[in-house]
Amino acid sequence: MAAKTVPFLGQEGKAGPRTKSPSSLLARANLVLGISASAIAFTSIVALAVFVILPIENRSADDEAGLIVLAAKTWVELDAARRPAFEIEMLENHDVTVSAHTLDLPYVEEGNRYYDLLASKLNERLDEPVRLMESDPYTEDDYEMIWANIPLGGYVMQVGISPQRQNVQPLYVGFVIVLFGAIIVSVTSGFIVRRVAQPLSRAAQAVEAFRGAGGFQPLPEEGPEELVTLAASFNAMARNVSELLVNRTTLLAGISHDLRTPLTRMRFALEMLPDTVDKHLVDRFERNLTAMEDLIADALRFSRGAGEEPTNVDFRRYLETVAADIDEDLAVVWRDEPPPFVQLATGAFRRVVANLVKNARQHGGGAELVVDCDRDLVVHVIDDGPGIPADDRDKVFQPFYRLEGSRSRATGGSGLGLAIVAQLCQAHGWQVQLADSPTGGTDAQVVVVLPRTPPPPKRRDET
């Protein structure tokens, strides 16, 4: 069965695990703007092609066909003396070559839309099929021309035009529109959305880092009106929660202090009782007083939450010392070698491990400490008991909650052990999760997220 994760518990003790990492606001906005820009670009390309490019292309081909036929007709109608001057004028002024000497030239390859359209326009004007040819037999360089054989007045005129006089390809126009549109959308969305995403990111980090303890840094109330309202609401909420927790701690500490005095008097009174009093009755009173003192001590731990600053500790030596303090026979199994030093609130972590070990021994018949350090630091407290049903794994972290089935009230305890564990984990950013152990019991895991460090650069001699 998969582990149930309780990373952060609220004031009501309800868990809120995140099943997956959602995409950022910037990524979503870029995606939406990208889709919108693509739709606009596609619509623009279609409109440009239908209403601008294709009509211009059709008109250009028709004008080109008219110029070719007109040049051929004019050459035929001129007398022989004036034809050379006309040929020179057409070549210099219109980049059109007119010749009565026809050569056998290869046809242009099919698939060029403009050439097909030009041939179609020539067919309409001459009422007979015309195919375009390529190459220029009159020049010695690589300059090529497109030729058409025009039959007129007993002549077959060969008229050539420059291949540069083609249409503007819609595909290239669309590519340019999409390319520059994507650049404009990326820059614009990156500028606009980042102004919204950065304050929201700061707010998310502040919410995640807020534990209700001291040292709260209020969010700057700046930016758009909605973000100012959000920051002001969060700051007010954080101040109220912090004051509530401080008042709760003060109240419980005061009550506990006031209760310890009469409890101490009651113990003195029990000690002063004569020997004639029933010893079983005295023992029962002593057990009740001990249970009340344990309950008060646990209530104080639960109310304090966190205020301890983390320090750099040698984790291996530290955990072995904690295990020895709990029980000299409690060994630690190291599946992986932990990092040499870990930032840790040692007192809070000691209390978390001690409470989990105590809980495992009370309800699971024993405890085993196992440490993994594959990616993060994970301390397992494993027992061989009946386990915890999946539906109750969130509830056991609530104060005073008890399992009525496999774990009865006869085992004792104040009902605050796991609640203290959850609150300390919440306060220090650790994660506590419950899973099934290999033997069917409970595997209580405390996860300490280690900072991610980039891998060292490779040396030049490494392959």
Image (cartoon, rainbow, N blue to C red):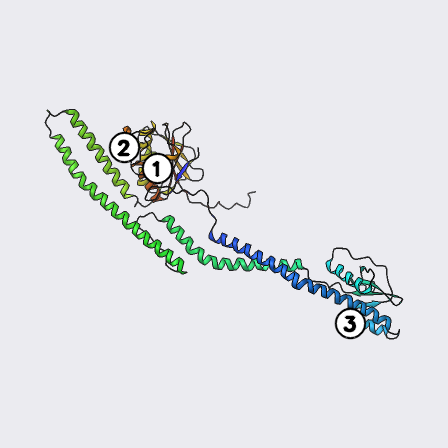
From the viewer's perspective, is residue 64 above or below residue 436? below
Where 365 falls versus 168 (above or below)? above
What amino acid is found at the position of numbered circle 2 in the picture?
Gly
Residue sitting at x 16%, y 27%: 282
Label 2 residue SS: loop
Q: Quadrant of the C terminus?
A: top right
- Amino acid type indicated by mark 1: Lys
Residue 67, percent across and down?
A: 78, 68
Q: Point out residue 447 in the picture as x, y percentages from the top left corner.
A: 39, 39
Label 2 or label 3, whichever lies nearer to me, is: 2
Neighbours of disc 1 within 10 Å: few (<14), some (14-19), many (20+): some
Residue 180 is marked as: none
Is 372 situated above or below 36?
above
Residue 92 disc label? 3
With 195 as the anchor, is 101 left or right in this view?
Answer: right
Residue that numbered label 2 is attached to: 413
Q: Which is in the foreground here, disc 3 or disc 1? A: 1
Residue at 31 percent of width and 40 percent of height:
348
Judge left or right: residue 204 versus residue 407: right
Label located before the other in sequence (1 or 2): 1
Q: Is residue 120 visible?
A: yes
**Quadrant in which residue 291 is drawn:** top left
Which amino acid type corresponds to the residue marked 3 in the rendered image? Glu
Mark 1 = which residue? 395
Q: Is mark 3 on a helix, strand or loop?
A: helix
Q: Where is residue 340 in the image (x, y as percent from the top left)?
A: 40, 40
Q: Are marks 1 and 2 in contact (CB under 8 Å)?
A: no
Circle nearer the viewer, 1 or 2: 1
Q: In the rendered image of this protein, does residue 423 appear above or below residue 168?
A: above
Q: What is the spatial separation of the Cα atoms under label 3 and label 1, in whole angstroms?
A: 93 Å
Disc 3 + disc 1, Cβ < 8 Å: no
